[in-house]
Amino acid sequence: MMMNKAVGLFIISILFISGFAISQNDLSDQINSQTREFFHRFSENTAESHIITAQDMASSSSVKAIASEIIPSNVCLSLGKYSSSPEWFLGSGGKTIRYLKEFDQELEFFVFCEKGSKLKQVASFFPEEKINEDYISHCPQLTPENEEVVCAVILANTTPFSGQESSVSYQIFFLFGILVILPLLFLFSSKNINVKLFTLIKTVFLLLLFVVFYLFNLILSGITTVLLLFFFFVQINLSIAPIILGLYADETSLIKLGIKLVLLLETVGLIVSLILIAPLL
């Protein structure tokens, strides 16, 4: 009899714990579906690039992922812990955020979407550094009568950046391109078709990276250094491979000198890239 009671209590306990775990998972999933953290970058020193509007946020992929049908009038911007900073200005009703200085900034936002009638109440369950009533007290959408979904977009963190690492990477690559292009083109005069093929691959790779660096200019500073390191590593391997395969055995002394010069420039580029990336590790 006592054994049956013990088994019964054990089963009830398991069911209770399982139910609690499931409810916790459901709550976690619900929170994840309502919130998101994302980054934005002020990358140019112009007045327009230092303004964020509710319309911008309403059309952003990060906010749309939470509330796909959100409209700009239901997005409220907040400066969060930066509300007292003289460097930032909040437009009336949370419609705009403006950065008043000329330095480039990488911004981290926290966005939370809920019905306007419930957002303040539900926000109280979050850590205060993420969202609290002071951060959203200016939002006119948060009324007991509003049953539409409202998104609070809160400035969580700002990091100034200068793009110095990026510019150094560009300068090194540009200098390398100038120095290497003539000896690289000279290698096309080789009699060996395989040497020409390796040279063609190296030239195409050089031009592709040039396009990425200077036309699109979409890569963050830390990634440019990594990409530069990868570029020199691949180029060195493409230079060493024909030497190991003995493709230059019958070439003229000028061709051999050209390949050695290209390899030397690539080795110097690789060493400089390693020096640049060391602080990022």
Image (cartoon, rainbow, N blue to C red):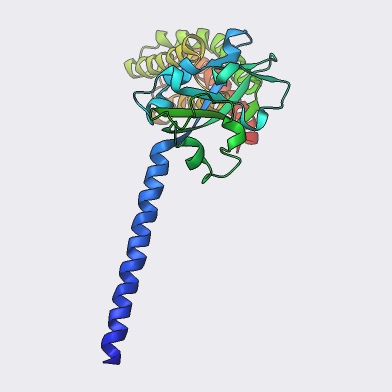
- Residue at the bottom extreme of this rendering: 1
Residue at point 54%, 24% (across, down): 77
Residue 174 image offset from top left, x and y in percent:
57, 12
Residue at point 63%, 28% (across, down): 158
Visible in this render: residue 43? no
Visible in this render: residue 154? yes
- 59 and 69: which is toward the camera: 69
Residue 150 image offset from top left, x and y in percent:
44, 28
- Name above or below for residue 2 compared with residue 50: below
- Residue at the front extreme of this rendering: 145
- Name above or below for residue 109 compared with residue 90: below
Residue at point 69%, 13% (across, down): 102
Residue at point 44%, 34% (across, down): 117
- 275 and 97: which is toward the camera: 97
Q: Is residue 158 left or right of residue 62?
A: right
- 210 and 56: which is toward the camera: 56
Residue 220 image offset from top left, x and y in percent:
54, 23
Q: How many marks?
A: 0
**Viewport quadrant of the C terminus:** top right
- Name above or below for residue 208 compared with residue 224: above
**Viewport quadrant of the N terminus:** bottom left
